[in-house]
Image (spheres, rainbow, N blue to C red):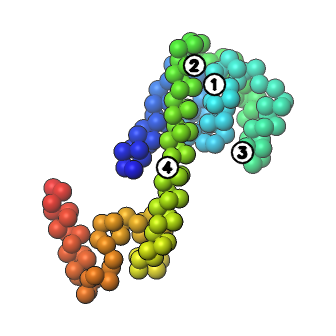
Amino acid sequence: MPSILNFSLRMPTTITNVLDHTFPEFKPFFNERLSKTALYLLENYGSAEKIARMNSASYDKLRCISRGKFSIQQFLRLKELAANTVGVNNSIFDLELNSLLTLYKSLSNEINTLETEIIKLIEEVHPHYMSILGIGPISAAVLYAEYGDISNFSNPGQSAALGYLQKLNRK
């Protein structure tokens, strides 16, 4: 799973690299984040040209997806940015962006599936780590995978020593 996560974490940068050519104003408009609303726009419109031609039905959908946070002023500003973009209209970039978005969505779905399975498995084992405030099921699963059952240690110093030895081995 770490390689899937690493690849998935690089995807927004890769998507941004394409947007830098086609619609460089897009990501700054969304405060450098690929939010749910931003991803919806990219998946459903895909180019500055299509975003510039959005209509009131498009706004209604965006407002719904953003749970009312996407204002009419933002909508009009985004359309204006799209109409006046310094980016290039290129079908190859559009195809690349569409492929990256499909891959990103697929990876996100796979990660969610894996996390659900990990949570189910760790709740079956229910290690003592789960009782520590601030440690959720995923963190507990990592600790359990790393150290096993905490009851195998006779005192806290043993688990700390194991962590220290593993840190030394990685250096």
Q: Position of residue 99 (x, y in %)?
A: 53, 26
Disc 1 to disc 2, C-alpha distance: 7 Å
- Give the mark toward the camera: 4 or 2: 4
Disc 3 to disc 2, C-alpha distance: 24 Å
**Of marks 4 and 2, which one's residue comes earlier in the chain?**
2
**Of marks 3 and 1, which one's residue comes earlier in the chain?**
1
**Of marks 3 and 2, which one's residue comes earlier in the chain?**
3
Which residue position holds label 2? 94
Instruction: Name the image quarter holding the C terminus.
Output: bottom left
Q: Is residue 132 visible from the viewing direction of this image?
A: no
Disc 4 to disc 1, C-alpha distance: 24 Å
Q: Residues within 10 Å of mark 4 (few under 14, many from 20)?
A: some
Which residue position holds label 4? 111
Which residue position holds label 1? 46
Disc 4 to disc 2, C-alpha distance: 26 Å
- Which label sits on residue 66? 3
Q: How many marks?
A: 4
Q: Does residue 130 appear left or right of residue 39 in this picture?
A: left
